[in-house]
Image (spheres, rainbow, N blue to C red):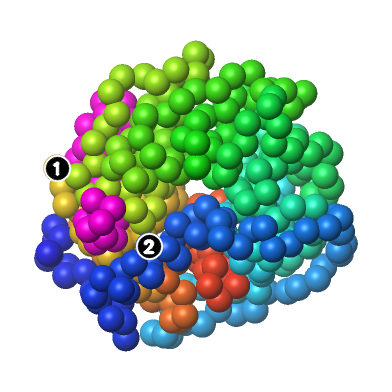
C-alpha cells in the first residue's frame, strides 16, 4: 500500500515476508519495548558502578555514505549494552540495558559513556522524576529509585501486597505522582515519588498495556492485545472516556512527536494487527484520516520537524499535513529496532540488537 506522497514503503531487505518473519519481528519488538521481557531475569546480584570515561564515540557509518539528504549525518556512534530505552535528565542520558543487567550514562557534551552501573536487578524501563531516576525490572517485579547523577540505588521496592507489581512495563512522572504500568495484570499504579508509597491502583480496560505517555494533560496507554488506547486523568487516576479504537492495532511501537501520539503495527493476524501507522490527536481523541504508511517503527520531533524510523534502517522527515515521508538517512544494517529519541539538540537512534547508540545531526 502506497502512502501519501507516492513513496512506496519498502519491505526489509533480505527477509522472508511471510507470517513467520512478522511473528519474529513482533516478538523481538515486544521484548525490546518491554526492555527485554524474556531476558530481564538473567542478571542478579549486588550493584556495581564503573566510574570515569569507559568508552568513547567513533565516527558513524552508513550504507549510503557519510551523510544523507540535506546534509543530515551521523556524528557519533557509541558502543553500549542493549540500549532498550533512553531516560533524559538535565545533564545526560541513561540507557537502560534490560538483559545486560547494566545501565549506561552518556554525556551528550562529549559523546562519551561516563558511567556503567550494574543494578541489583536488570532494568529496562524508567523515567526521570527530578532529582531521581526511577526504573523497573519486568521479570523481577521490582521498582527502584536511583540517584540520577551516579546511578546509585537509593530505594528498592519489591513486589508485595502493598506494592502490586506484575510485569512493570513503563513509568512516567507527572510531578507530584509517579505512574507504573503493569503489563501482566493490566493495572496502573500510582506512587509517591518521594516516599515510594503506593497511593492507588487503576484497572485498565483491555489486555497487555504498554508504557504510558503524557499528552494534553492526560496519561495515554496503548493496550497492545486489545487494539485500543486508554486515557487516564492524572488528577483522579480514573479512566477518562471510552477507549480509542486503533484499526491497525499497536503491535509495533508507540511514540509521541509533534504534539501527537503515533502507533505503528506489523501485520499479525492472530493479534488483530495490520501493518500501518495511526496518528492520534490527544486534544480531540481523533485519529488522523491520513495514511502515514507501512513498515514504520517510531517517531520523534526535533524543533518543528517530525521524524520517523522504519524497520529497514532508514530515517524519514515526515510532512504531517500530507503524510509524505522524505527518506533522509539510511543506517548500516543489522538492527530492525531503530528507536528515535530527541534530546540535547540532536536525534539519537537506539539500536538494541547491535548494541549501538547513534547521534544524528539533521541537515537543512
Give the residue displayed 28% in from the left and 65% down from the top: 295
Front residue of 75/270: it is 270
| Quadrant where the N terminus is found in the figure | bottom left
Label 1, label 2: how many angstroms apart (C-alpha)? 25 Å
Label 1 sits on residue: 289
Q: Residue at x 60, y 72 (%)?
A: 355
Determine whether the residue tagged by mark 1 lies in a helix, strand or loop: loop
Judge whether residue 147 can be spotted in this image.
no
152 falls in the magenta region: no
Q: Are marks 1 and 2 in contact (CB under 8 Å)?
A: no
Residue 314 lies, in percent from the top left, at 36, 71
Question: Which residue is at a point 30% across and 73% down the rendered structure image?
Answer: 20
Q: Give residue 5's position: percent from left, percent from top.
A: 14, 61
Q: Looking at the picture, does residue 203 appear above or below residue 207?
A: above
Give the residues in magenta: 263-288
Residue where numbered disc 2 is placed: 26
- Left or right, residue 135 beside residue 306: right
- What number is the disc on residue 311? none
Q: Is residue 212 above or below residue 323?
A: above
Amino acid at each position: 500500500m502506497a502512502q501519501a506522497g507516492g513513496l512506496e514503503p519498502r519491505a526489509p531487505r533480505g527477509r522472508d515476508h511471510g507470517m513467520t518473519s512478522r511473528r519474529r519481528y513482533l516478538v523481538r519488538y515486544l521484548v525490546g519495548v518491554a526492555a527485554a521481557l524474556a531476558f530481564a531475569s538473567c542478571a542478579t546480584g549486588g550493584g556495581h558502578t564503573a566510574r570515569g570515561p569507559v568508552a568513547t564515540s567513533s565516527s558513524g557509518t552508513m550504507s549510503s555514505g557519510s551523510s544523507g539528504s540535506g546534509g543530515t549525518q551521523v556524528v557519533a556512534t557509541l558502543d553500549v549494552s542493549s540500549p532498550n530505552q533512553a531516560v533524559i535528565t538535565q545533564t545526560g542520558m541513561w540507557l537502560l540495558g534490560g538483559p545486560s543487567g547494566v545501565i549506561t550514562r552518556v554525556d551528550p557534551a562529549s559523546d562519551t559513556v561516563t558511567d556503567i552501573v550494574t543494578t541489583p536487578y536488570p532494568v529496562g524501563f524508567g523515567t526521570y522524576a527530578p532529582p531521581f531516576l526511577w526504573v523497573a525490572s519486568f521479570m523481577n517485579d521490582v521498582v527502584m529509585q536511583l540517584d540520577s547523577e551516579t546511578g546509585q540505588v537509593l530505594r528498592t521496592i519489591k513486589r508485595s501486597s502493598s506494592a502490586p507489581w506484575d510485569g512493570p512495563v513503563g513509568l512516567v512522572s507527572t510531578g507530584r505522582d509517579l505512574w507504573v504500568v503493569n503489563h501482566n495484570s493490566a493495572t496502573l499504579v500510582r506512587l509517591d515519588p518521594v516516599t515510594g508509597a503506593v497511593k492507588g491502583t487503576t484497572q485498565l480496560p483491555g489486555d497487555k498495556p504498554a508504557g504510558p505517555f503524557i499528552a494534553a494533560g492526560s496519561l495515554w496507554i496503548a493496550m497492545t492485545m486489545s487494539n485500543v488506547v486508554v486515557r487516564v486523568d492524572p488528577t483522579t487516576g480514573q479512566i477518562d472516556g471510552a477507549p480509542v479504537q486503533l484499526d491497525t492495532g499497536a503491535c509495533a511501537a508507540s511514540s509521541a512527536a509533534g504534539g501527537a501520539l503515533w502507533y505503528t503495527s506489523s501485520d499479525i493476524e492472530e493479534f488483530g494487527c495490520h501493518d500501518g501507522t495511526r496518528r492520534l490527536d490527544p486534544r480531540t481523541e481523533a485519529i488522523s484520516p491520513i495514511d502515514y504508511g507501512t513498515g514504520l517503527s517510531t517517531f520523534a520531533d526535533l524543533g518543528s520537524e517530525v521524524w520517523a524510523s522504519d524497520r529497514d534502517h532508514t530515517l524519514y522527515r515526515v510532512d504531517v499535513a500530507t503524510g509524505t515521508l522524505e527518506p533522509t538517512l539510511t543506517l548500516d544494517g543489522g538492527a530492525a529496532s531503530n528507536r528515535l529519541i530527541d534530546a540535547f539538540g540532536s536525534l539519537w537512534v537506539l539500536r538494541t540488537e547491535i548494541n549501538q547508540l547513534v547521534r544524528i545531526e539533521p541537515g537543512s
